[in-house]
Image: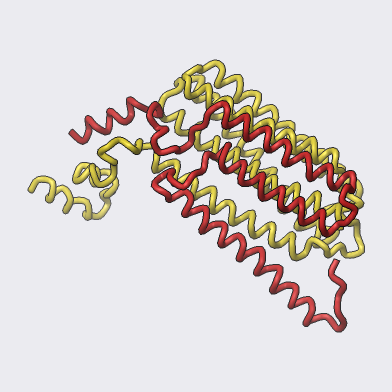
Amino acid sequence: MSAASKAGHDDHGHGHGHADGGSHGTFKDYMTGFVLSVILTAIPFILVMGNVLGNDRITGIVIMGFAVAQIVVHMIYFLHMNTKSEGGWTILALIFTLTLVIITLAGSLWVMYHLNTNMMPQHMHMG
Amino acid sequence: MATQSSAAMNFEPGRSPSVTIPQVDPTAFYDAKGEHHPEGSTMLGFWLYLMSDCLIFAALFATYAVVGRNYAAGPSPKDLFDLPLVALNTSMLLFSSITYGFAMLEMEKGDLSRVQIWLAITGLFGLAFVGLELYEFHHLIHEGATPQRSAFLSAFFTLVGTHGLHVSLGIVWLVTLMAQVHKRGLVPENKRRLLCLSMFWHFLDVIWIGVFTFVYLMGVLQ
């Protein structure tokens, strides 16, 4: 019984894999993702190379926003992430990883900034 | 009783428990309704590997963020980075992502020769990416901007080089899978492997978004 049901799974292969939304996408998904990615890549390059906004700080914040948007686009349309795949374990692993990534990045910058400030005889100019 | 005795045998030394546990209670592992297929656990495991890889890159990004402005009186990103080249590089990786997607779509249809063609195109875009990056590195080192020159350059070469190494190994993996698909066709095992490489490949594109934004574009802004 168990062997038969397992073999049945193997025969199906990925034919009915859409139920868990795992790693499958449609042509429309990929094209949507691609077009959005091209737009979200082109705009930051134009902003920086053409110095459109005229303010480095604002440009920096804007292109970071574009990067985050493009990462989300890639996750949804190329990696086919959703909250239901693998019973929610993929999204849980992703959230956990993002938490660690944010702690690593923000923590390093925070600690090292204070280290620089406190160790230097006079204030270093940052940047 | 028979199943209980075989369960007890699982814990004998030298005997792999994973071999016998499914005989004990298969429904504990496989959804009886058929909502999961056996490859599901591989995909989740590979996803966890990608997440751990993500942490490696997080550490490298953090290193770059901390020492990225320590030029040691050497060249700064503004002096070194050639944005049109980076834009070209970015487009190569983006094209390779969409062509890998097309290979996956053909795999769903079961069209073996088209899968191979799209995989080959993906590999060529990947090679173009690595080639452009090596050209850039060679150019920088030729100008004296070596990894030893400053903390900024050490962090830059480590971060971008690790990504480039991932793409290079991805190409090796891609060629290996093309040979496997050529030899054995689109069997379930090969489909599973192609799906894993698909995740790996798209994941590297995601990392590159961070690299071109944070390292190249923000570097030139300063």
Q: Position of residue A21 (x, y in %)?
A: 44, 37
Task: Judge left or right: residue B215 versus residue A75.
Answer: right
Residue displayed at 80% across by 41% down: B86
Residue displayed at 28% across by 28% down: A8
Residue displayed at 54% across by 51% down: B51
Residue displayed at 66% across by 50% down: A68
Q: Position of residue B185 (x, y in %)?
A: 46, 20
Colour yellow maps to chain: B
Quarter containing the C terminus of chain B: bottom right
Q: Is residue A108 above or below residue A89?
A: below
Q: Position of residue B108 (x, y in %)?
A: 47, 24
Q: Quadrant of residue B82?
A: top right
* Residue positioned most to the front: A53
* Residue positioned most to the left: B1
Q: Position of residue B218 (x, y in %)?
A: 80, 54
Task: In this rendered view, identify the residue nearer to me: A42 or B86.
Answer: A42
Colour red maps to chain: A
Count of marks, rendered view: 0
Task: Judge left or right: residue A46 versus residue B100.
Answer: right
Task: In this rendered view, identify the residue nearer to me: B173 or B208.
Answer: B208
Task: In this rendered view, identify the residue nearer to me: B202 or A49.
Answer: A49
Which color scheme did the rendering employ for the protein?
Answer: by chain
Task: Judge left or right: residue A113 versus residue A79.
Answer: right
Q: Quadrant of residue A49?
A: top right
Q: Is residue B218 visible?
A: yes
Q: Is residue B157 visible?
A: no
